[in-house]
Image (cartoon, helix red, strand yellow):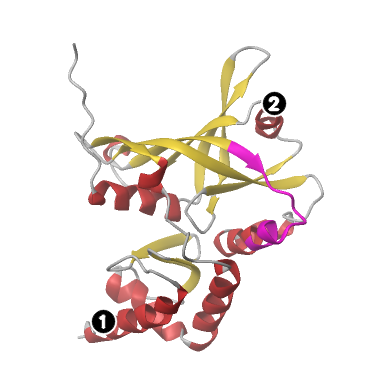
Amino acid sequence: MAKDPTLPVDDEARALAKKLMRTARSGALATNDAENGMPFASLVQVGTDLDGSPVILTSQLSVHTRLMEADPRCSLLLSTIGKGDPLAHPRLTLQATAERLDRETDEAQSIRRRYLLQHPKAELYVDFPDFSFWRLRIASGSLNGGFGRAYRMMAEDLLTDMSDFFDFYDFEAEAVEHMNAEHADAVALYAAQLCGAREGAWHLIGIDPEGIQMALGDEILRLSFPRTLTGPHEVRPMLIRLANEARSRIS
């Protein structure tokens, strides 16, 4: 019997998988074609819900939309892009069930807001009547973190627990707007000093119990908190703590 090449899932693997999910701007979506029994892969833009669940925006004219309507089972491949051998970079395959969101609900409007922060150019077509948001409900994942670093992961390894963050969509929207309007300098310091990114007009695009996302042009960064927050009341103190830490690193 062949040896199982996968490793036990640890916190480092979880953090890497979640970073991929929170920073990927696109992915390869595989759906099922019932007519010929063949898989169908297509490139899609990817956003995330508060818990990290992938969110995609598709047109009714797209083949993968019609296939998800007939069979919601799907798979999404996310990967980092860098120099050298593409197989040397981390990638994550998610197995999921696609769920179309009713565009008139408050939840869909909140997801629309978050998606446009990550993909601002989508505002040109996001409200076309033939477009819909889909949430991919994760069943499991397969992470390859590089040579000899393969992991089989369950949904609880990949998603953020939001059970103590009631009505967090509104809280997050206000916090993101406030930070970008009043504390843009702190956001820029998070990126440059804590993430080692290039200096620039970085802006906040997402907050969750485990970290924040920032964007500059087409680049998205993930900054994980030192610990998982237990409620919305801990967001402000954590952001202040990170700002102080970033300022302390300025030479």
Residue 223 circle label:
none
Disc 2 residue type (three-letter): Ala
Which of the pair 130/100 is nearer the observer?
100
Foreground: disc 1 or disc 2: 2
Q: How many marks?
A: 2
Q: Name the residue located 19 percent from the left edge and 86 percent from the top edge.
A: 251
Judging by the rendered image, the residue that carries numbered circle 1 is 245
Which of the pair 169/112 is nearer the observer?
169
Q: Name the residue located 43 percent from the left edge and 71 percent from the top edge.
A: 231
Q: Is residue 47 left or right of 112 when viewed as pictured?
A: left
The outermost residue toward the right is 129
Disc 1 residue type (three-letter): Glu
Precedes in sequence: disc 1 or disc 2? 2
Residue 70 circle label:
2
Q: Is residue 101 visible?
A: yes
Q: Quadrant of residue 22?
A: bottom left
Q: Position of residue 57 (x, y in %)?
A: 65, 47
Q: Are there few (<14), some (14-19), or many (20+) residues within 10 Å of tag 1?
A: some
Q: Position of residue 246 (x, y in %)?
A: 28, 81
Above or below: residue 162 compared with residue 26: below
The outermost residue toward the bottom is 182
Q: Name the residue located 64 percent from the left edge and 63 percent from the top edge.
A: 110
Please check the rendered image and state whether residue 103 is part of the magenta-colored stretch, yes or no. Answer: yes
Q: Position of residue 172 (x, y in %)?
A: 54, 72
